[in-house]
Structures are given as structure tokens and as C-alpha cells.
Amino acid sequence: MSHLLSDRRFKVLAGAVVATAAASQWTSMADASPLFNVQLLGRDVTQGQTAFSPTVGVAVGDVVEYQLVGNTSPIGTVYPGSTGAAAITITSLTSPVDGANSLRFDQFELASQDIQVNIPNNAGFPNGWSNVLDVSPGQTVPRGNGNADVTGIRAGQATGQFRGISPEVIMTGSMTVTSSSGTNPSLVNIRWSSGNGSLHVNGGGLGRFPTLTSENGTAPMLSYAPLTLTPVPEPTSLSLLGLAGLGLLARRRKA
């Protein structure tokens, strides 16, 4: 039920998120009240893109590689608190006792969006994020239109190890663009999954434990920035446009 409410929230906010995606950089994210921030970045390897970006132009059949990047909010951040979690002001960040230790995610897309991708459970976990005992790339779940989302992704460090004071890659993988039915940008989203996580700040003296309840509440401990997909013309469309332009030029010359 909580995930259904979350989906409705994404539908309401989708337009606003797309409009501000280009401005959702690490500075603005880190200045927000959550304690930890995650962002999906992508690149279209079919089109030869090499740099990861929060917005990717794609066509049907393209393969998009992604990274989930995470970082702790900076010193001075005030987390307002939520049910079962008192407010915190971050006063210090020390490695390896501060940052995140264990994280739980779902990766998904709304079936109503113009661009649809199929997301397999092929996640990898660099930088030691596979060292938690219950590490998992998650399970695929049908989206209802022939594509799949992934739920129950589990990434984590070894016991007592915390990372992500500075931005670093937590998870990598790929997805395939299966359809594009319009011109509107579409979002590949990340959200908290079931189960508890673990965050530390202030020299490890203050621990907070994200749950599905906290992350669906009014003061989540993490911020979640989606990957934005935008349609690019397919080669056949470009050819037709080129032929139309040549025809118009020929008519002008005859006139």
C-alpha cells in the first residue's frame, strides 16, 4: 500500500521533477534536509555516449547504462526528524565511521510515461557495496506492459564500515529502451524498498535507520533523484525530414 501511495506521489510530481532535473546537481541536493542523497545517472552506449548525466537522450532499442551515486549531506545540514527518529544537525563527518552502511532500493518507472524501459536485475555494487551479508540485485516485477521493474535491491558495506561522505558510485547496471510513444521526458525512479538501512554522522555518534515508513513520510532520511530520459529522432525520421527539406528546396528553385 505504501508503494501505491508513493507511485501516486510520483505521478503528481513528475512534471515538476522533469522541469528541474537539470538543476538537481549535488550542491542543491546536499543542501536539502535529508541526511543522505542518491541520484541515478545514465549514458546511452548505443549512441556512443561516454559521460554519465542526469538526462539522457534515447531511441527505441538503445541500451542505457546507469550509475546510482550517493553522498552524505554536508556539515551544517539540519535533518528535521520523523516518526521514531529525532532531529539531527550534522556537525562532523569522519571516515570510515560516517556515511551509509546499508541501503535498500526499488528501481522503477511508471507505465504511463512516453518512454518505456525494461529494467533487469543486473545490478553490480562497486566500492565495497557488495560486502553486506544480504547483498542482492533485487527481483524483477512486471510493470504490466511487458516491461519489468526491480524491487528489493540491497547494497551495503561490511559491519562497522560506512562510506559516501563524498559522492561515490553505489550501484551500476543497464536497461533497454523498448518503446517511445511521444515527446515528453520520462523518469526512471529510485525509492526506498522494504527493510532497514543504516546511516551515521557526527563521528559515528548518531545513527539513523531508514525504513519504508520513514522514507514515505514527510521527512525522509534520503533524497532520491531520478534519471530523466528524453526522445531523440530515429534515423528513419531524420531521413524523412532530410528528404522533405530537399523537396522544399527544389520547389523554391523551380519557382
Image (spheres, rainbow, N blue to C red):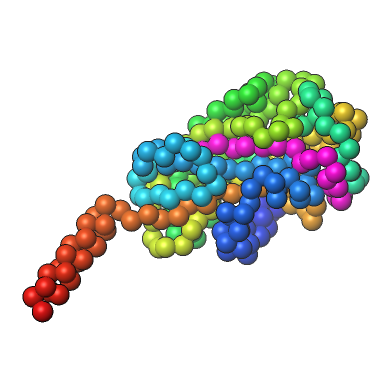
Please name the residue shown 38% across and 60% down the image: 181
Count numbered badges in the picture: 0
Q: Horizontal and vertical percent for residue 145? A: 44, 53
Residue positioned most to the left? 254
Nearer to the camera, 133 or 205: 205
Viewer-side residue, 226 vs 111: 226
Q: Position of residue 253 (x, y in %)?
A: 11, 73
The residue that appears at 26% across and 58% down in the rendered structure is 237
- Foreground: 237 or 4? 237
Residue extending farthest to the bottom is 255
Q: Between residue 157 and residue 17, name the one nearer to us.
A: 17
Q: Provide residue 162's location: percent of width, then percent of height.
A: 76, 26
Q: Residue at x 63, y 51 (%)?
A: 24
Residue 69 image position (x, y, % from top left): 62, 37
- Indicate whether residue 34 is drawn in magenta: no
Residue 199: name its quadrant.
top right
Tell me which residue sits at (64%, 48%) in the image: 25
Q: Is residue 111 visible?
A: no
**In magenta stretch: residue 73:** yes
Q: Which residues are magenta?
A: 66-84
- Quadrant location, the N terminus: bottom right
Q: Is residue 127 visible?
A: yes
